[in-house]
Image: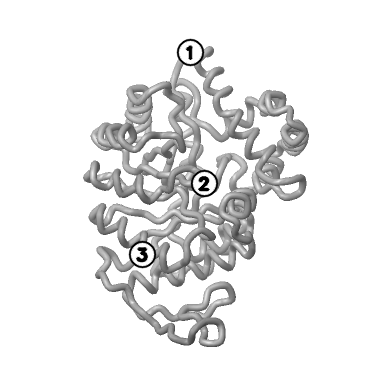
Amino acid sequence: MRVGMLLNYAGGFREVADEAVELERAGVDLIAVPEAYSFDAVSQLGYLAARTERMTLMSGILQLYTRTPTLTAMTAAGLDFVSDGRFELGIGASGPQVVEGFHGVRYDAPVARTAELIEVCRQVWRREPVIHQGRHYRIPLPADEGTGLGKPLKLINHPVRASIPITVAALGPKSVEQTAEIADGWLPMFFHPERAQEVWGEALAAGRARRSGDLAPLDVFASPALAITDRPELQAAALAAVKPQLALYVGGMGAKGKNFYNDLIASYGFAAEAERIQELFLAGRREEAVQAVPDELVRAISLIGSAGEVAERVAAFAGAGVTTLTVTPLARDSGERVALMTGLRRIVG
């Protein structure tokens, strides 16, 4: 199992790079850089590529609506070049609040757009003239939609690799099924090891049944919070630290009936709790929404506890098919984060 870390949205480039050097020495395999509506991930990844030598660098995630498929492919090839073949492309649809609210782009057909983007990326990396006439992307642009001067072009540079790993952030059944069929990795959110099979098992099996033999087995990610401590008061503080994010996603990422994360938590057996969190959050009672997040849920999706308890949870994630952990260490400073990641590396082995 690979051990990785998800960077904080608010992290400074230089501080993060210094920390990444220490994490690499500690045996951490991967750093994933998020984007959302923070600083762009690409500039940070390029900076990290210059400061590290061994660890994998991953976008976690580039939003598919904010870049054309060819620009996504060019960016991935460029990051793979400056990192000497250490880049993994993490992509995802994000959600309508970010895509429409921050970028002003219509949020539509995420599953179909993802498939087309992956097809174009792989065509670009093989240095083929890009010809793609899909429902959502047409390359070159047909003459009746533009000047008529567009022609098929191939990437000028020779990529380090003709096939850069692509991991897709996916939650819904159709998206997960497609990911299991065509992507290299799958990045779900709020992964619950004991409920994952019940929620996603059918979709994963259907996608894997159609998976090409040219692809390696699907790399399954999980991104739990991490706190390794024997002290009950610190465990309680760690549980409390996770709850605001859960309340935000379950309660505030979308409207009633249109919140992917609320639906997911409900499918884990917390339907009443998810409904209550959303009700409080949308009413502006955010602190109460945070308090309504049950400890049982936080423990299930996190790595919080003594070294022995964390080892048991790591085994549960592995038993549920997880092959890469990209954790969020709950720490006050860089030294604590490095210590936590070192501890996790020892536990995983």
On residue 231, the disc is 1
How far, Cα to Cα, is label 3 from label 2? 20 Å
Label 3: how many Cα within 10 Å (few below 14, some 14–19, many 20+)? some
- What's the residue at 54%, 18% (across, down)? 237
Q: Amino acid at mark 1?
A: Arg
- What's the residue at 52%, 52% (across, down)? 169
The quadrant where residue 126 appears: bottom left
Where residue 256 appears, x then y in whole percent?
76, 45
- What's the residue at 43%, 85% (across, down)? 149
Q: Which residue is mark 3?
A: 74
Which quarter of the image is occupied by the N terminus?
top left
State the SS at label 1: loop
On residue 11, the disc is none
| Horizontal arrangement in the rendering, residue 124 relative to residue 232 (left or right) | left
Front in this rendered view, residue 348 or 334: 334
Front in this rendered view, residue 125 or 44: 44
Q: Which residue is mark 2?
A: 36
| Horizontal arrangement in the rendering, residue 26 relative to residue 153 (left or right) | left
Label 2: how many Cα within 10 Å (few below 14, some 14–19, many 20+)? some
Closer to the N terminus: mark 3 or mark 2?
2
